[in-house]
């Protein structure tokens, strides 16, 4: 399985731990944004940031599974999720795992491709099948 993990930069340690565990299970990441340099502030690095975002969009679209570490401020990760969803038009629905305490509900979470989990332990149990 090819996966992509989105989340805030403050969650990089958790994202890297999960990536390592998924690699150990034989899965592959389509892109590890945590290993890339930061282009912030984006307005001052617009050209480099635009090139990076184009590369990222292509990689996200190639994933079989999208994993989102939930946080209250997810603007960038939600754009990534939109790219992933848009890339599956006309194809078999892809899996979307939302990981973390989510105190909000969304009607789309009722769709079979959405799986909401409390932690990475639950995620690894689901994916390892």
Image (spheres, rainbow, N blue to C red):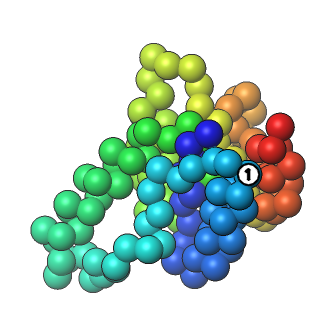
What is the quadrant of the C terminus in the image?
Answer: top right
Image x and y of residue 90, in percent: 45, 17
What is the quadrant of the N terminus in the image?
Answer: top right
Image x and y of residue 60, in percent: 43, 47
- The total of numbered circles placed on residues is 1
Quarter residue 43 falls in:
bottom left
Q: Nearer the viewer, residue 58 or 10?
A: 58
Q: Is residue 107 visible?
A: no
What residue occupies the far top of the structure in this picture?
90
Above or below 16: residue 127 = above
What residue lies at 33% left-to-right and 45% top-to-bottom?
58
Q: Nearer the viewer, residue 41 or 104?
A: 41
- Horizontal relation, residue 40 to residue 22: left or right: left
Image x and y of residue 111, in percent: 70, 29
Q: Is residue 60 visible?
A: yes
What residue lies at 66% left-to-right and 65% top-to-bottom?
20
Image x and y of residue 106, in percent: 68, 44
What residue lies at 26% left-to-right and 53% top-to-bottom?
54
- Horizontal relation, residue 31 to residue 58: left or right: right
> Badge 1: few (under 14), some or many (20 or more) residues near its Cα, within 10 Å?
few
Above or below 107: residue 41 = below
What residue lies at 73% left-to-right and 51% top-to-bottom?
25
Secondary structure of the residue carrying numbered label 1? loop
Above or below 49: residue 4 = above
């Amino acid at each position: 399985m090819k996966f992509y993990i989105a989340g805030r930069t403050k969650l990089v340690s958790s994202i890297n731990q999960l990536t390592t565990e998924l690699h150990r299970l034989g899965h592959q990441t389509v892109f590890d944004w945590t290993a890339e340099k930061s282009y912030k502030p984006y307005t001052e690095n617009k050209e480099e940031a635009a090139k990076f975002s184009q590369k990222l969009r292509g990689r996200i679209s190639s994933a079989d599974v999208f994993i989102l570490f939930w946080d209250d401020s997810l603007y960038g990760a939600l754009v990534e999720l939109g790219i992933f969803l848009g890339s599956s038009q006309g194809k078999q629905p892809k899996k979307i795992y939302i990981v973390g305490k989510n105190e909000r509900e969304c009607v789309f979470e009722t769709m079979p491709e959405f799986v909401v989990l409390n932690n990475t332990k639950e995620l690894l149990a689901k994916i390892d099948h």
